[in-house]
Amino acid sequence: MATLKVLVVDDEPGIRSGVERILRNFKVDYPFMDEMYNFIILEAGTGEEAIQIIEKDMPDICLLDNKLPGMQGIEVLEYIRTQKYDILVVMITSYASMELAVKATYDGAYDFIPKPFTPQELKSSIENITKQLFLKRMARKMTHEGKQVRFQFLSVLSHELKAPLNAVEGYLEIINKRQLGHELEAYDEIINRSLKRLHGMRTLILDLLDLTKIETGKPNQKIVDTNLVKIAESAIETMMPIAIQKDVQIVLNAPDKLNRQLDPDEIEIILNNLISNAIKYNKQEGKVEVIITEKTKSITIAVKDTGIGIDENEKTELFKDFFRIKNPKTKNITGSGLGLSIVKKIVELYKGEIIVNSIPDKGSEFIITLPV
Amino acid sequence: MKKIILVVDDDMDYLFQIKLKIEQFGFEAITAESQREGEKVIEAMKPDLAIFDLMMENEDSGFILSYKIKKKYPEVPVILATAVTAETGMGFNLSEESNRSWIKADLFLDKGIRTDQLEKEIKKLLKI
């Protein structure tokens, strides 16, 4: 049994003793945590007192009311952050100051609990925090500071590259040893799978090259007078073979000509990625619409599909390196997981914006606005 | 009776190949394609050995499955198979006490392992 120290900072003694009562016999258990966690409660009635206790006892978790008599909760949060203390902060707040609580989460609070809360609400929040704390400490133990993002990128990359290699190698071994008998037809399926995996690997490598180009920065960018509509037309043409396979219809909705100062290669990468996603994640006989519009100081590229859609909680993950939505509907869709991350990076080079609208099973829409 | 080996992996090609291998070793293979499916199998039956992929729906799916199966059947040996290993620094050495305490698996294997080695490791864990 391991014990976490929870500091409750609230000027109402009732809240403090309530928390103490609720958490007194509470325990958190979590897969691959070696032991259960329980909690001891430290109490502070003011922000000043809270800081003394933080310095003396170094709690693991801090439940922080914002409205305090002297120093405000948000200042205590600020203090913890500037001292770089390893304390997860949860704001306790009344519904009226919800906006403030949300702001606090931007400033480094991990979560907030609206007041009044039920014992169950407090418990589930503490449970989440404990898991978070555990994973955070584990991650720190495993990686060296500052290298984490790169490390993660490389480890996922090596995973993504080795998985298809292993698959193809395994299939070749089966063929080599004639493990499915001597009829050639018996091997059709595994040969097709091998080709598919190799194709996926090629896409990944091409995407990686795109990514390196963007990440090494602007020197490579060649901004020229570019006709967006022409690029859209050629991107649609490039994607036609996969659209035909799925009976997906692609419609371009754009003016005859739209010239702006852009890097044509980058625009092509954006359009290729968005259109190929719109086809891949579409339903059979679905529709893809590419809409290009202009304003005096910006252009908008929208790609709309009639596909499987994206869950609300997946929207934020969507643009991360190697993120791929995994569910039964996407099982047979291949991809590197880099496409949207590349698109986003390009959009950022132009200081533009990308937004996603989606309704599961109805379709998604990606809208890019570039201030050019 | 043939020993039953449960394999959970979201790579259908790996699943196909390892099933073939396991059958050649003389065991029966039961496969599942996700953490969720794997959990259902564990609920329903007790395999003699389990092989889990590390990253499936979640980055730690394999850890969670090992935890769950060890909780229900502490005696069932578990192999965690992954394509991520030494070159990324992500190798876990299970002979170290500090790792053994939180990774509930008996063995960490690279997915590219040779067939004869795999057979040897499985048989060792099954005490055959």
Image (cartoon, coloured by chain):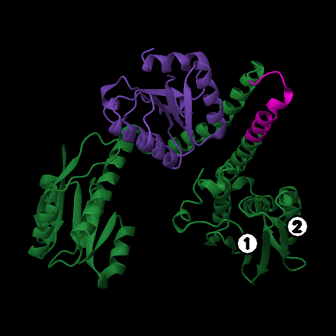
Chain colours: A green, B purple
Relative to the observer, which residue lies in front, A128 or A342? A128
Foreground residue among A101 and A51: A101
Q: Quadrant of the N terminus of chain A?
A: top left
Mark number for residue A304?
A: 1
Main structural element of the magenta stretch: helix, strand or loop?
helix
Q: Nearer the viewer, mark 1 or mark 2?
A: 1
Amino acid type indicated by mark 2? Glu
x%, y% of residue B105? 40, 31
Q: Residue at x 33, y 75 (%)?
A: A101
Q: Position of residue A339 (x, y in %)?
A: 68, 55
Q: Position of residue A21 (x, y in %)?
A: 12, 64
Q: Residue under mark 1: which chain is it in?
A: A
Circle 2 packing at 10 Å, graded few (<14), some (14-19), many (20+), is some
SS assignment at label 1:
strand
Q: Residues within 10 Å of mark 1 (few under 14, many from 20)?
A: many
Q: x, y (%) of residue B21?
A: 62, 24
Q: Which residue is mark 2?
A: A233
Residues behind callouts 1 and 2 on a single chain:
yes
